[in-house]
């Protein structure tokens, strides 16, 4: 039977190598930790602005965002002295305001006639190039067909508005309203008609 012995000197060498290995292991971990890098990204967000405004003369624009604050269309004086078959015309101009950053699709969303004269009135709307072109019998891009009851929006077509350059209002769109009295109009009848347009922002 044989026995093996390790000399004290050899044992010291083994311990030294093991210690050296531990030191190398720690050194490798430190080196790996030093090889790191980071990238950061941030996004800043905010909402744009959207508003349309209207004018009865193409010069003075304001918000008319309620029935109580509706713009009064400048029909000729004869609009209050109609006889059967008469027609009167008036412009209404819409655009995006200077703070708006989006274009818009605009639709006629409601129409209402009031008073005893309303059942005897029809209307049509066309898009024309300028307020001066809005006269009886004006031709342009049809928005509402002529002969539509003043309390209806049947056949109404949408139109678009463009946003202006930074800090500027968009190009105006001129709508020409033409209202015609029916043959059954009675003397002394009075009333009014109100129209509502709704704009939806588009990119």
Image (cartoon, rainbow, N blue to C red):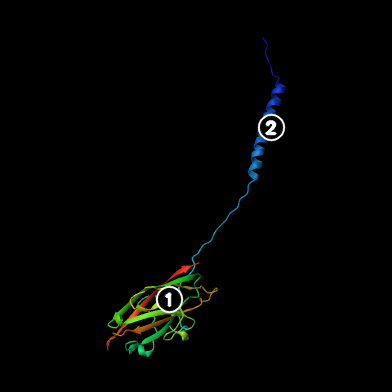
Which of these two is toward me, 48 or 114? 114
Give the quarter of the image for residue 14: top right
Q: Secondary structure at mark 1?
A: strand
In the shown orientation, is residue 27 left or right of residue 138?
Answer: right
Q: Residues within 10 Å of mark 1 (few under 14, many from 20)?
A: many
Q: Is residue 69 visible?
A: no
Q: Residues within 10 Å of mark 2 (few under 14, many from 20)?
A: few
Expressed as whole percent of the image width and height from the top left, the position of residue 5 reads 69, 16
User: In the rendering, which numbered label is found on residue 103?
Assistant: none
Q: Residue furthest top?
A: 1
Expressed as whole percent of the image width and height from the top left, the position of residue 70 reads 37, 79
Q: CA distance from mark 2 to mark 1?
A: 90 Å
Which of these two is toward me, 81 or 2? 81
Question: In the displayed structure, would residue 65 be above or below residue 26?
Answer: below
Of the two numbered discs 2 and 1 on the same chain, state the one appearing first in sequence. Answer: 2
User: In the rendering, which numbered label is found on residue 143?
Assistant: 1
Q: Is residue 80 visible?
A: yes
Residue for point 40% across, 77% down: 145
Give the quarter of the image for residue 190: bottom left
Give the quarter of the image for residue 124: bottom left
Expressed as whole percent of the image width and height from the top left, the position of residue 19 reads 67, 31
User: In the rendering, which numbered label is found on residue 20?
Assistant: 2
């Amino acid at each position: 039977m044989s026995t093996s012995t390790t000399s004290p000197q050899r044992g010291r060498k083994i311990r030294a190598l093991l210690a050296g290995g531990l030191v190398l292991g720690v050194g490798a971990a430190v080196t790996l930790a030093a090889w790191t890098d980071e990238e950061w990204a941030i996004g800043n967000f905010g909402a744009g602005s959207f508003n349309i405004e209207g004018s009865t003369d193409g010069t003075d624009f304001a918000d008319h965002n309620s029935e109580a604050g509706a713009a009064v269309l400048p029909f000729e004086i004869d609009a209050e002295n109609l006889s059967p078959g008469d027609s009167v015309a008036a412009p209404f101009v819409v655009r995006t305001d200077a703070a708006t950053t989006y274009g818009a699709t605009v639709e006629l969303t409601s129409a209402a006639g009031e008073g005893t004269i309303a059942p005897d009135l029809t209307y049509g709307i066309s898009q024309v190039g300028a307020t001066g072109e809005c006269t009886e019998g004006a031709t342009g891009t049809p928005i509402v067909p002529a002969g539509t009851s003043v309390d209806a929006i049947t056949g109404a077509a949408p139109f678009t508005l463009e946003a202006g350059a930074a800090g500027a209002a968009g190009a105006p769109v001129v709508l020409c309203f033409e209202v015609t009295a029916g043959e059954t109009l009675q003397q002394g009848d009075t009333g009014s008609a109100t129209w509502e347009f709704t704009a939806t922002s588009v990119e």
